[in-house]
Image (cartoon, helix red, strand yellow):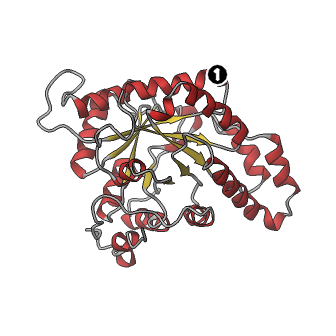
Amino acid sequence: MASLTDRPLRAGSRLERALRAGYFAVTAELLAPDSADPEDAYRNALPLAEVCDGINATDGSGANCHMSSLGCCALLLQAGYDPVLQVACRDRNRIAIQGDLLGAAALGVRNVLCLTGDDVSNGDQPEAKRVFDFDSIQLLRVAKMMRDQGVFLSGRKLDKAPRFFLGAAANPFVPPLEWRPHRLAKKIEAGADFIQTQYCFDVPRLKLYMQRVRDLGLHEQVYLLVGVGPLRSEKTAEFMRTRVPGVWIPDALVERLTKTPKAKKKEEGIQICIEIIQQVREIEGIHGVHVMAYRQEETIAQIIREAGLLPRHPFGDKPRRAAHPAGPVAAVGEEAMKLKE
């Protein structure tokens, strides 16, 4: 199997080029707005523009309805950003998913994160019907087939194959811990070029996971970006570890927030996130971080700055101005790339 540096460029996105060049990459999550106004998407993306190599547009995160990931990606592309399309298997069958992938490629989307998706029972419309025609591994295989073989799953030939830098999610932090690296191996075999993990609040547990990943040689086959994010308070931590599937937060971290004065809890949560990023950077086989903070894009930008992850490095095409008359956001595309090497 070709190493990360030997394999050909999959799509040539800014994110892929940054990783290929050996830079510690930064992606961030943009919560899709509950709005039909493109200004809301632009406004949410603006704080992330100068601090990220890629911006994830969520796809019904938490099984709640928001503007579609594809719609957000189209708007981000108009502003000159490098979006990451999230595709969850929960809501669409294989016909719709393959059609969306082609449509995304035609729009210029080059990064795709393949997800199984949160169950509808986690959202605010639990009576919705589940689809789950694919899971994330099957979706990866189909997206890779479309890219590398130029065919649909049916075998019907594509007139023009899409170019995708394919991603998947991983969770190193919940049992069965010994099985997690093998699950990662399956996603790599299915076609994953990069991985974004669940929130990391336990660096020792991540180190144990990465030791096994290195033992299996997986760190040389995929780019690993570790999920990080701030906690506003111990109440937020308790909610996340009891109500959000897959999130592990150790007691010591909750106790640290509990002992912090109320007026300083938010700053302490930010500091904890920064400390985790700095520790993660020292782990062999980690290629970047994925920063997540619900409706806190300004805080994400602050964390990236204060963690010493700037300046970012511009790769790929020069951003274009947004085609939509976005007022003060219209020039975001150019401003986003005024970065120093």
Where is residue 35 drawn, in percent x and y? 43, 59
Q: Identity of the amino acid at label 1?
A: Glu
Q: Is residue 274 left or right of residue 19?
A: right
Q: Position of residue 321 (x, y in %)?
A: 28, 71
Label 1: few (<14), some or many (≥20) within 10 Å?
Answer: few
Depth check: 50 or 123 in front? Answer: 50
Label 1 secondary element: helix
- Between residue 331 and residue 336, name the one nearer to us: 336
Does residue 132 show up? no
Between residue 49 and residue 274, name the one nearer to us. 274
x and y percentages locating residue 159 in the rendered image: 11, 36
Where is the N terminus found, in terms of image quarters?
top left
Q: Residue furthest bottom?
A: 328
Give the answer, above or below, for where 91 lies relative to 325: above
- Reply above or below: 275 against 200: below
Quadrant of the snapshot with the C terminus: bottom left
Residue 204 seen in the current view: yes
User: In the rendered image of this protein, does residue 204 appear above or below residue 145?
Assistant: below
Q: Which image quadrant for residue 132? A: top left
Residue at 47% from the left image edge and 46% from the top image edge: 65
Q: Residue at x 63, y 48 (%)?
A: 282
Residue at left offset 24%, top offset 31%: 148
Give the residue pinned by disc 1: 178
Q: Is residue 263 left or right of residue 305?
A: right
At a point 59% along the width and 55% down the height, the residue shown is: 293
Q: In the image, 119: left or right of 38?
A: right
